[in-house]
Image: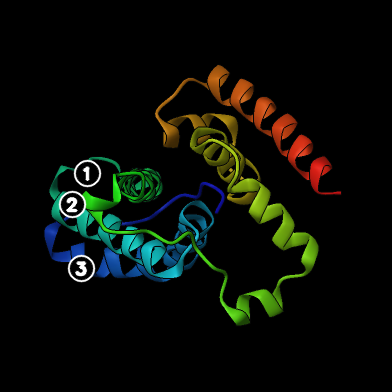
Amino acid sequence: MQAETVDIALSSGDRDEAISRLYEEHALGLTKLALIMVGDRESAEDAVQDAFLGLHRRWRLLRDPAAAVPYLRSSVLNNARSVLRRRRLPSWFAGAYDPPVWSAESAALLGAERREVLEALHRLPQRQREALVLRYYAELSEEETAQAMGVSRGTVKSTTSRALDALGRILGENA
């Protein structure tokens, strides 16, 4: 999911074609990003669909075609945050929430070590988890990560460092 140039015409006539092409090229990666953040496939797919709908609605406001992918990435991240926020609401208001359970096929495909890392990742605070996922899973630069998270580059560096330390401690406890 490295940053790449997007050669999209910005006319409204090309909007559907351009968004379809963006969807074909980036939906899977964005869904994987959201899945790591929220922990269940349905919520991840919803977060990505909402991001593409938002892009479709705001297409005429897009000045730079290269901004479409960072816009989608930030939107997916914000949608994942909303999902996690709703899960923290009192159960009488939002309904009971059961933490994600990795599906049988996912569990079979993932090795025990990878599952352990994913579980440890979900024990991190949201901001630390976001920083690690964007930097190391999505392979974004510090600058791109800062843009997606809406923070400074220095905040990304310090948050990532603290997250790696915390992840190491969590995984050390489980050893």
Is 140 displayed left or right of 15 in the figure?
Answer: right
Q: Looking at the image, can residue 144 be seen?
A: no
Q: Quadrant of residue 56?
A: bottom left
Residue placed most toward the observer, 39 or 135: 39
x%, y% of residue 20? 30, 70
- Name the residue located 54 percent from the left edge and 56 percent from the top edge: 36
The reply to whether dot 1 and dot 3 touch (C-beta < 8 Å) is no
Q: Quadrant of the N terminus?
A: bottom right
Question: At numbered mark 2, what does the secondary structure look like: helix, strand or loop?
Answer: helix
Q: Residue at x 80, y 48 (%)?
A: 174
Amino acid, disc 1: Leu
The residue pinned by badge 1 equals 62
Residue highlighted by disc 2:
59
Residue drawn 51% across the image and 55% down it: 33
In this rendering, is residue 110 above or below 127? Answer: below
Residue 165 located left or right of residue 2: right
Where does residue 138 sit, x and y in percent of width and height? 58, 50
* Residue 157 seen in render: yes
As drawn, is 124 to the left or to the right of 33? right
Q: Position of residue 86 (x, y in %)?
A: 30, 48
Give the mark nearest the N terminus, 1 or 3.
Answer: 3
Between disc 3 and disc 2, whose residue precedes? 3
